[in-house]
Amino acid sequence: MSSFVQRLTLFLHRDLWKPTTGKWRKVWMGALKRLYLTIRLFLREGLAYRASALTYSSLLSLVPILAIIFAVAKGFGLAAFTEEWIRSNVVAKPEIIDTLVGFVQSYLNHTQGGIFLGFGLLMLLYTLFSLTDSIESAFNEIWQVEQPRSLFRMVTDYTAVFFLLPIFIVVTSGLTYFIYSAADEWLPNVMLLRPTVLFLLKFLPYLVMVLFFTCLFAFMPNTHVKLRSALLAGTLTGVLFQLLQIGYLHSQVWLTSYNAIYGSFAALPLFLLMCQIAWMLTLFGGALAYVDQNLHSFYYGQESVRLSRVDHDCLCVQLAAAVCRQFAASRPPLSARQLATQEKVHLRVVTDILGELSQAGVLLKIPETENNRETTYLPAGDIHRLTPATLLETLDRRGTSLPLTEESPWRAFRSLRKSLFSGLYADTPLHELPKKE
């Protein structure tokens, strides 16, 4: 067992990251890399605890969300289809669905009576925005996004989600019903044509869930997500989510003793458990999308590196010089991802150092815009005055300075340290430094 653990550790930390040949071997090794890194990211960021918080927020928002969905469906005349879609796609026992539908009908009746136009409306908006903001915060943590959406973008984007999600559910439920009816009535029963088509239609719910999760992974993080990465994560998450529902339905046979103990109350903890697992799958898919898009930034599987002081200072000079060169050449500012690719430095290291330089006032962080979905960086001052010496002195001044007396031996040490910066490149601006070979 000890020998097996040693070989496995050696494989995960060294052999897995070596260049390989062969088409299928590359595919399998790439899949193992993504799976290994995603599991590590999931455990390191504590996403299981995030899933618990999202489960709580989901319970608060479940009835208002369903009320909006039913209201939109009723306007399209598809309320019955939508209810059937919810019954077949929500992971819960029939007792839970019946209770939720009853709550929704009562909610809509009271809303039409004008009771919830004041405080109730505010509570509705609060629960919906709170849930969406919690989801965005979880995805931003996965993607290392420090800047959340602005208040204006939160209102516009979240409002669009609240209206588009019910329309998506209504349209997909109506379209699914129409396709099933058309295939059952119009397809001729010629040899295997009709049975084959009806068999393929069983995979339609999988396609719907894949589309839903792909849109979620691409839209929710406040950064640019490649469609390929979102589709990969959405496909895996959508399939696992459908399998979760199938497993939940078949597990009812094994839970007879549990139901005998808790009775009708057993439906609630089981629903909470399934909701927790569903959110864990969702956050795992978000981590997979991040890993797939940034796989090239991992060095032998290491996402974060404990830099020595000399390497830290050198990278600060290197990245600040790259930003200043871009500005001096009148080229568009670079993002952390672009700088990591250009300078061949790990993305997490680049992100941490750029954040430190921004807080020190060396660089200026430019929030994302409609044309550029990534945060970019510009010099915060005159590039002709920004030298390696001034940069390192600025970093040394960060934090709280201790009161030093004239007799303190550390004053002489500080003077000596400052004189070290007055040597090579002391008067050379960063944008004139030679590029890294």
Image (spheres, rainbow, N blue to C red):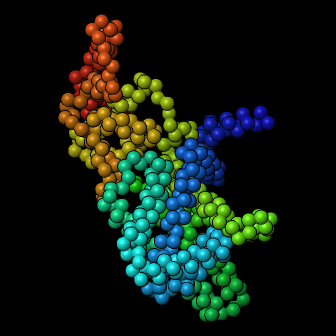
Q: Residue at x 56, y 78 (%)?
A: 101
| Residue 148 in view in this figure | yes
Of residues 51 and 261, which is closer to you in this image? 261
Q: Quadrant of residue 71?
A: bottom left
- Percent x, y of residue 290: 50, 51
Of residues 419 and 129, which is closer to you in this image? 129
Q: Residue at x 30, y 61 (%)?
A: 152
Q: Residue at x 44, y 60 (%)?
A: 130
Of residues 215 and 153, which is closer to you in this image? 153
Q: Quadrant of residue 400?
A: top left
Of residues 132 and 232, which is closer to you in this image? 132
Left or right side of 161 for 194: right
- Percent x, y of residue 58: 53, 63
Q: Is the residue 362 above or below the residue 416 in the image?
A: below
Residue lying farthest top?
407
Q: Is the residue 188 above or below the residue 168 in the image?
A: below
Q: Quadrant of the C terminus?
A: top left
Q: Residue at x 54, y 45 (%)?
A: 45
Q: Is the residue 158 above or below the residue 425 in the image?
A: below
